Image (cartoon, grey):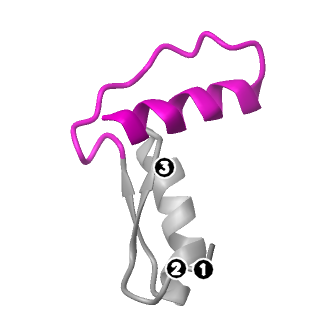
Amino acid sequence: MKLPRGSQLVVASHNPGKVREIKALLGPHGIEPIGAGDLGLPEPDETETSFTGNAELKARAAAIA
């Protein structure tokens, strides 16, 4: 999926440092990342056994919220 310049992208993370890192990567392309914490979304428990599993869990929780 290609996002046009000026788009906003929800980052399913409550870690401000991680959101800043993603902003540094996407900002030059005109994409504005917004952290789940900045939107007041609940932070799900990381119950999966892998990084990938927990990332998917957080992404699904953010999409549902």
Of the numbered discs in the image, which one, if any, rests on residue 2?
Answer: 1
Q: In percent of the image, x 74 and y 32: which residue is there?
A: 52
Amino acid carrying label 2: it is: Leu
In the depicted structure, whether residue 16 falls above or below residue 58: below
The N terminus lies in quadrant: bottom right
Q: Nearer the viewer, mark 3 or mark 1?
A: 1
In the depicted structure, whether residue 61 falls above or below residue 37: above
Dividing the picture into quadrants, the one containing residue 34 is bottom left
Q: Position of residue 53 (x, y in %)?
A: 71, 25
In this figure, which residue is indicated by the disc labeled 3? 17
In the depicted structure, whether residue 43 falls above or below residue 19: above
Amino acid carrying label 3: it is: Gly
Real-space Cα separation, disc 3 to disc 1, in angstroms:
25 Å
Please tell me which of labels 3 and 1 falls first in the chain: 1
Dot 3 falls on a residue whose secondary structure is helix
Q: In percent of the image, x 28 and y 34: which residue is there?
A: 41
In this figure, which residue is indicated by the disc labeled 2? 3
Q: Which residues are magenta?
A: 36-65
Q: Position of residue 30 (x, y in %)?
A: 46, 87
Report if residue 64 lies within the magenta region. yes
Q: Is residue 12 found left or right of 26 in the rendered image?
A: left
